[in-house]
Image (spheres, rainbow, N blue to C red):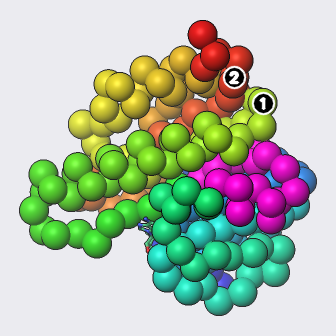
Amino acid sequence: GWRSRAAFKLIEIDDRFKIIKPESRIIDLGAAPGGWSQVAIKRGAAHIAGVDLLPIDPVHGADFIEGDFTDPDMPDRLKTILGGPADLVMSDMAPNTTGHAATDHLRIMGLAEGALDFAMHVLADGGTFIAKVFQGGTEHQMLNTMKHAFQSVKHVKPPASRKESKELYVIATGFRPDNLKN
Ligand code: SAM
């Protein structure tokens, strides 16, 4: 079975957008307890490098680091595990909620922006980025950066995401690193 209810969200996103390609090399940000990694391996990913503040039980085909994704060494460490750039960077990261809506919103968007910056350092040409964001959406600056750096940017609320929750996922495909140089 899947280790997390979150696993169903990735299944629904992938059924619709086919982001997990056979032989994909994937970075899983905020991977604990490992549900998304389980789904990605099951769907044919070649190798997953994941990181979380929390320890994660082994998943065959995945290697996990217990640490903070903002650690300056983390992009290189995860790329080294994969043996090259990633085809997909997926972030389901969420902070511990405070119950104060505005604070929670800011924190989740901070993690999403950090994940985007991380992705732009580790993705291969044509790569895909997905991240949990908040309704009301992706902040202008983050959206502008994504529209510049990727061919297509979409938002989706998978059915498995509770209706009363304000989370959404942003899906950016076709990474174009050359667009960032000018
Ligand atoms: N997708 C996962 C699954 O299916 O099992 C569930 C992820 S859970 C919703 C969010 C995770 O983000 C938590 O385990 C949390 O520890 C992690 N996280 C939050 N901030 C982080 C950070 N700065 N670095 C690494 N992981 C972080």
- Which structural element holds mark 2? loop
Residue on which the image places disc 1: 125
Q: Residues within 10 Å of mark 1 (few under 14, many from 20)?
A: some
Q: Residue at x 44, y 61 (%)?
A: 93
Taking depth in this image into account, of 155 and 160 the one nearest to the observer is 155
Mark 1 and mark 2 lie on one chain; the one further toward the N terminus is: 1
- Which structural element holds mark 1? strand
Residue on which the image places disc 2: 176
Residue 135 visible (yes or no): yes
Disc 1/disc 2 C-alpha distance (Å) = 6 Å
Q: Residue at x 58, y 79 (%)?
A: 66
Instruction: Indicate the amino acid at tag 1.
Output: Asp
Instruction: Indicate the amino acid at tag 2.
Output: Arg
Marking on residue 32 = none
Q: Indicate whether 172 appears above or below 179.
A: below
Q: Is residue 6 left or right of residue 139?
A: right
Whether residues under marks 1 and 2 lie with C-beta atoms below 8 angstroms apart, the answer is yes
Residue 180: quadrant of the picture: top right
Please report the bounds of the magenta region as a residue range. 75-90
